[in-house]
Amino acid sequence: MAKHKPKGTEHTNSPEEVIPSNIARFGPSLFLKGELSGEEDLVIDGKFQGKINLENHNVLVRVGGNVKADIHVNSITIKGSVKGNIYASGKVFISEEGQLHGDINAPTISIMDGARFKGSVIMDKIAKSVSPLEKEPELQFSKEEAEEPKETGKEEDTKDDSSLKFRDL
């Protein structure tokens, strides 16, 4: 006898399985060799070899997805296999079934137990431009200050008293 499930408990696809229309999908039967760029998020189930440039967007490499490329993205989630360097302005996430053989340059990374990773990590912000408030202050000298010190007629103390002396500029 078949059992009826109460309404609302039917099997629904996980959020990963439902791909919104504004996300490109590279299917499991596809193999592409070349350079990929665009203005939308990408889900990879197939095999890709070359270069991926989606700097302002996110990439998901699903289980079974196989990528051999240098990847420039906002964020990437790896559940499949990636061989190449990743440059992310957001986050790099490697799931427990994910594999990465390459270097990571990203401000945030997460590697789950069981994930395979071989490479190096640089945790820097990849910034296209830096606002004036984010820049470190630079010391600026006038041309006269950068030249040799002038004789002032004063005799300077040349003793080494192992304490630092500061003067107002």
Image (cartoon, grey):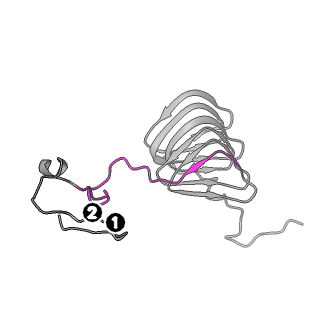
Membership of 121 in magenta stretch: yes
Q: Nearer the viewer, residue 155 or 166?
A: 155
Q: As shown in the figure, which amino acid type bears the numbered disc 2?
A: Thr
* Residue under the image location 48 percent in, 53 percent down: 124
Q: Position of residue 66 (x, y in %)?
A: 67, 38
Question: According to the image, label 2 marks what residue?
Answer: 158
Q: As shown in the figure, which amino acid type bears the numbered disc 1?
A: Asp
Q: Which residues are magenta?
A: 116-139
Q: Are marks 2 and 1 in contact (CB under 8 Å)?
A: yes
* Residue under the image location 19 percent in, 49 percent down: 146
Kindly indicate the quadrant of the structure image that contains residue 11. Answer: bottom right
Residue found farthest to the left:
153
Residue found farthest to the bottom:
6
Q: Using the numbered discs, state the Cα–Cα distance from disc 2 to disc 1 in whole angstroms.
A: 6 Å
Secondary structure of the residue carrying numbered label 2 = loop
Q: Nearer the viewer, residue 93 or 39?
A: 93
Q: Position of residue 16 (x, y in %)?
A: 62, 55
Q: How many marks are shown on the rendered structure?
A: 2
Question: According to the image, label 1 marks what residue?
Answer: 160
> Which quarter of the figure is the C terminus placed in?
bottom left
For residue 165, above or below residue 100: below
Q: Which mark is residue 84?
A: none
What is the crowding at mark 1: few (fewer than 14 residues within 10 Å), some, or many (at least 20)? few
For residue 144, above or below residue 157: above
